[in-house]
Amino acid sequence: MFRKFWLDVILGTAFIFGLMGLFNSVTAFKIFDVFDPIGEAFGDMEMTDIVFSQLRDDPVAEQRVVLVNLSTLQRGEIGMMLQIISKYNPACIGIDSFFYDPKEDTLGDMMLMEGMAGVDNLILAEKLLPHPDDPEQDTILYSWEAFNQFAASNAFVNLITDAEVQEELKMCREFNPTFDIKGDQRLAFAVRMAAAYDSVAAADFVARNNETEVINYRGNVLDYGATKFGNKYYALDVQDVFNENFVPDMIEGKVVMFCYLGKYLGDRESLEDKFYTPLNEKYIGRAFPDMYGGVVHANIISMILNRDYINVMNENAGIIFAIVLCFLNVALFSLIYKKIPKWYDGITKLFQLVEIAVLVYGVIYVLELYSFKADIALATFAVGLAGDSLEVYYGVVKNSFTKEGRKSLFKVDKL
């Protein structure tokens, strides 16, 4: 009897995971299109977003990273700003933008070259274009060689999102610290810039050897309420630079990034190079992207320099956790099914609700207290299916494999 019970527990667990695989495959047929409005509101959300948008304590402002708004400036004007900033001896200047081709404005190109030439440690952007099928066709895009010759180094500015075009929702939660392409390991833009300030901290971060890293967001730049922490990075607008409206200590020895921050600081209308982040105050059904790409890079730099990483549960550990939790649920629910069948539905539903609530709140607070992101999606799915699925297993699957069960299904009572 004891062996039979545990065999049922094992087979019941296998049956639940089989159903999960089936449900996962049928979503490809879009049979739940009726729920699309709800899915669109919640599909871009993770429960851990609540930690960033609601629970985090107010961090101190980052003083080691300074952003300079490129706005809609011409190349010559950017060159002039580079000359102004570089004379205050920053640790590096990175430009999160591309200058692919020469312009008809030859003077403007020459002024930009002159500005770049005067920077001691200039980091220019590159864009990785890995081919989906043939690594031999991988490409890397750089600025025009006449500009790129002044770069002390190049680094890729690619960020991870599910969007294919700008108009789609661009949620950015993680990034690649390094990427192997064309037989070479390339560094992310933020990692390269962090290394210019603290090479040991950057090396320690890369040594974690994670393919992707979750971004531990710190805050934004003058966003007028788009995020909870809207003023955590120093930023200079165009006129601030030209009028030298800053103290030298703000620039000297700091990481300076030239990037697009809107037509002016605080511009919330522009969508160019703009992302949704977990800091967004509207973490359900987000209405408007909240952070420019340059600020995303700045948050990564801060995370590296502070060694304030977010560790993530291994995928295999998440699967094992789901199997173990499902197994324990099946064992408990099997006892209830056999001992007190009249109470089965009520008790199992209560257990499922409590478990899912504990899992969700546990993940949220573990991330908040220990900077550890647990993957409970599979475990939550298993718990949610366990009660009703086990009833199907005992009432249909198991009976269909016994002679008595099949006979009772087709038995007709005589009048």
Image (spheres, helix red, strand yellow):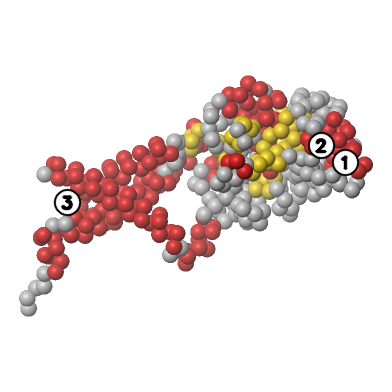
In the image, farthest residue toward the front = 136
Residues at discs 2 and 1 in contact (Cβ within 8 Å):
yes
Rendered position, 174 above or below 45? above
Give the mark nearest the N terminus, 2 or 1. Answer: 1
Q: Disc 2 marks which amino acid?
A: Phe
**Residue carrying label 1:** 109
Q: Could you say whether the residue bearing mark 1 is in a helix, strand or loop?
A: helix
Answer with left or right where residue 407 lies relative to residue 181.
Answer: left
Q: Which mark is residue 46?
A: none
Residue 328: x %, y % from top left: 27, 42
Q: Quadrant of the C terminus?
A: bottom left
In the image, farthest residue toward the top = 200
Answer with left or right where residue 27 lies relative to residue 59.
Answer: left
Residue beneath the point at 81% across and 45% down: 101
**Residue carrying label 2:** 147
Residues at discs 1 and 3 in contact (Cβ within 8 Å):
no
**Residue carrying label 3:** 338
Single out the mark in the foreground, 1 or 3. Answer: 1
Circle 2 crowding by C-alpha within 10 Å: few under 14, some 14–19, many from 20: many
